[in-house]
Image (tube, rainbow, N blue to C red):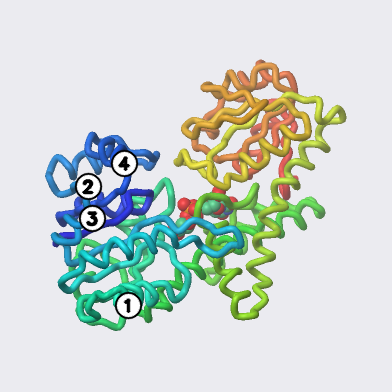
Amino acid sequence: MNVGVIGAGYVGLTISAVFAKWGHDVYCVEKEYEKVKDLKAGRIPIYEPGLEELIKETQEKKKLIFTTDLAEAVKACHLLFIAVGTPEGPNGEPNLGFIEQLINELVPLITQPKIIVTKSTVPIGTNESIKNKLIHAGVQSQFITVVSNPEFLREGTAIHDMCHPDKIIIGTDQAEAVKQLKELYKEINAPYLITSVAGAEMIKYAANSFLAMKISFINEIARICDAYHVDVTEVAKGIGMDPRIGSSFLQAGLGYGGSCFPKDLKALEYAAKQKQIDPHLLQATQLINDEQVSLYGQKLKESFPNFPDISIAVWGAAFKPNTDDIRNSQAVKLINLLTRKGCRIHVYDPVASLSLQDVTVHSSMYESIKGRDGLVITTEWEMFHTVDWTLISHWMKGKVVLDCRNFIDPLLLREHGFEYVGVGRP
Ligand code: UDX
């Protein structure tokens, strides 16, 4: 099948590469000429394991082309995926400017039936509004089918998540659109759920909100465990054995960041308030998450009588491992908090790059801890599991290690003479 993908960000690049891998002919449309030039040369602007190789491979097989020419893609493709950004607006309402712009550009190009599939996360009712705006602008209604097909890709595992989803949500009442999408997704072995358009839009927000809430739940439990000297990792393991709860997303720590959870919770909170509904749980989820940074800052302060006159190594800037993305990173928020208080901060991250005033960035993990009073682990990169703690204990001046991701075994650190500090980790 010919497939048009409009937008070459995290989602657009991933779905373009995977659709092409499945043998479809993909036209990925990107407005920025320089970005298209890089993509054609096989260079991608993001760190996503396996994506650069897959984009090179599918371009060599001529299954994927990058273009700035929207008309070319619209002419060639019956299926057109919208994968443009919907960034957070000032009051939490998503900014749909890129979608509005795209609608205007599409109007003169749609002269035969097209199925427009919204991959981007959009507020409830947006798909309906896209269709109405296109028709209002003069496109014949029989030429337009708009479908909501939300993605559930995680940064760092996006290709895997695209190829092995736990579900495929299709929001439409048009049987032909369902048929076309099932043909497109025929490589995937996953259950379909065909819903209303608005239902699919809401499923995306509800899913991310629930996952974020689960994280804030275990973080609140961790605070109570901390006061009672209970190990929250044991509690998480115990409750996770109940299939109704499930073991994932119960890793207590610094909390959630990234370009999705914070934005989507604010968007759903805004949508609720628009209908005079008080979104208590959504607000509490965000409040707990926001407090996590100061909670860990306080833990560090309590570990040093001479705080903030300390020099600290911070391992991790990315909002999670296996990505270079520092958007809404809790690690960066903690680094900023400690710097503001006057601590001298030395950061190491294996992939994410950081440039902050008064913060020293190191390219070596071991260099970053030389002479430091303490170490703070903020992102659970796998490599931190294979650290030579004997070497660390020789090079580090102090003995405090604050584990913000419950990632290191306290016994291992204590055996090496370190003082392990965590929340809910006695
Ligand atoms: C998320 C959703 O998982 C994905 O389905 C959606 O499509 C996009 O948003 P992503 O933001 O890439 O994906 O990362 P995810 O792995 O969900 O982690 C989100 C944040 O939660 C990270 O900051 C991570 O450190 C944190 N987290 C995750 C926890 O603090 N504890 C956990 O147990 C799990």
Q: Is mark 4 within 8 Å of ligand 1?
A: no
Counting residues from the start of the chain, the first of labels 4 and 2 encountered is: 4
> Which residue is identified by label 3?
70
Q: Tag 4's secondary structure? A: loop
Classify mark 1: helix, strand or loop.
helix
- Mark earlier in primary sequence (1, 2): 2
Image coords of residue 7 (percent x, y):
33, 53
Report the mark closest to the observer, 3 or 4: 3
Query: From what the image shows, is residue 339 above or below residue 115?
Result: above
Q: Nearer the viewer, mark 4 or mark 1?
A: 1
Q: Which mark is residue 292?
A: none
Q: Residue at x 78, y 34 (%)?
A: 341
Residue hosting label 2: 67
Q: Would you call the spot at circle 2 few (<14 residues within 10 Å), some (14-19), or many (20 or more)?
A: many
Q: Nearer the viewer, mark 1 or mark 2?
A: 1
Which residue shows up at 43% across the image and 49% down it? 155
Q: Is residue 29 placed above or below 271 in the rendered structure?
A: above
Q: Amino acid at mark 1?
A: His
Number of labels in the image equals 4
Farthest right residue?
305
Q: Which mark is residue 136?
A: 1
Tags 1 and 3 in contact by the CB under 8 Å rule?
A: no
